Amino acid sequence: MKMRDKKKHKVVGLFSGCGGLDLGFIQAGLDVVWANDFFKEAVETYKRNISEHIVLGDITQISSSDIPDDFDVLLGGFPCQGFSIANIKRSMKDERNFLYKEMLRVIDDKQPKYFVAENVKGLLSMQNGEIIKMIKNDFEEIGYVVDYELMKASDYGVPQHRERVVIIGNRLGLKNPYPEKTHGNEKGLLPYISTKEAVGFLSKVRIRDKSFILKGTKIINHKARTNVHDKFWGRKHKVNQFDICDYLKFWRAESGWSTKRVDEHFGYAHTAGHWFRKDNNSGSIPNPSDWWELKKILGFDDKYDKQVTELELKPITFEQSLRINNWDTPSDTITATGPEIHPNRERRMSVRECALIQTFPPDFEFVGSLGNMYKQIGNAVPVLMAQRIADGIKKELDTYDEQQRNRTVREQVLK
Ligand SMILES: C[S@@+](CC[C@H](N)C(=O)[O-])C[C@H]1O[C@@H](n2cnc3c(N)ncnc32)[C@H](O)[C@@H]1O
């Protein structure tokens, strides 16, 4: 049993997964006392590396009375699938969108001083910004001062250009502290950390199921998918992008719909402009479901239906996919669905490489099937970025506690 440090600020984690966000707060010197997730393997990973305090279960089925009282910070990377711009069916009706309400419930019941919520970039544009407004209002209504910012992990020394919306709220009228950038191309900042710097040492090391010793260091989870000859859904027919976009431009003008109105109809921000080559941009062809919807509102004929909507499975060759992950710059986002192909190996990035890019410590061991491990890592907040957020909150809380102590002393003296 871990001994609790009474002086440390206490944290509760919801939707903790394997613990990226929670670990960042621990590394900053806070004490996570309780956590929850319903993803079995992620919970096992959390227990193995962080602590047994995580409870496996669906948060909608956990009553607030089963969560400890008197903690200072609530964390919650509430699920993002329903919000993501990668998901074309995203909608306010997706019930996962409302899992943040569980977080709202726990905050309202427990009144932590701070909360931190993390989500995908798509949250900002969803329903023309209505969703983020709704979330902010909901937290304000229960007494919190709320801010949100789009943070790029590479700006804080993470070897990955991952962008995430971070919402911070507090109920004490304190600052919601967002960390200063430390890395970047601008003068005065440290250079970005590249993929090569983070995982280059594993590049020539054979992947294997078991752990092994490399130059005196134990390497775990250096296992990887090897399917580099993948397939993707591509267009069956040759298309001329300009012709199709100019055709759409003509029909939009005919129908009297403005580009803005079309965007509003779809719930997009600045997407339709590309379909109509607004400002003479190079244009992009709508995906098949958007095409059929456009046809309903603009009333165009069948001229390009086949070209736009008929798709087929096409192979990706290894040579094409070689360029997928960056090597001399920070990595692209490590996703939960499938790892990128290694820049110069005929395999995908290994679990360990993905974990290092997400700034998990080298000895953090993942549990579960290969797919499950990739999912836990891709879901996580980069540990270093979480730690930088936590540093700011700890500083605010330390100052607040100090002021409270001084006030109590003054009151006692005056008595
Ligand atoms: C974006 S991930 C959070 C990652 C985590 N913050 C980290 O840094 O590692 C969202 C998590 O929410 C969990 N989740 C989704 N619905 C849940 C529910 N109803 N109850 C508990 N956990 C849930 C998922 O299993 C997933 O691990």
Image (cartoon, rainbow, N blue to C red):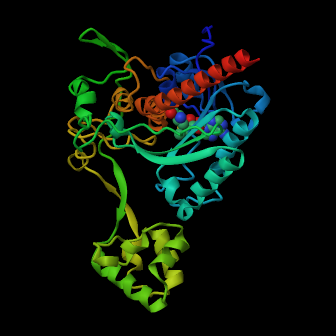
Is residue 10 among what the camera can see?
no
Q: Is residue 343 left or right of residue 262?
A: left
Q: Nearer the viewer, residue 216 or 30?
A: 30
Q: Position of residue 143 (x, y in %)?
A: 70, 44
Judged from the image, the quadrant occupied by ligand 1 is top right
Residue that appears at 30% across and 24% down? 207
Q: Quadrant of residue 43?
A: top right
Q: Position of residue 236 (x, y in %)?
A: 34, 68
Residue that appears at 32% across and 33% down? 157
Q: Quadrant of the C terminus?
A: top right
Residue that appears at 76% across and 36% down? 109
Q: Quadrant of the N terminus?
A: top right
Q: Nearer the viewer, residue 81 or 164?
A: 164
Q: Quadrant of residue 238?
A: bottom left
- Residue 85 higher or lower than 196, as above or below: below
Which residue lies most toward the bottom here? Answer: 254
Residue that appears at 53% across and 70% down? 266
Q: Nearer the viewer, residue 278 or 362?
A: 278
Q: Position of residue 297 (x, y in %)?
A: 53, 82
Q: Nearer the viewer, residue 309 or 173?
A: 173
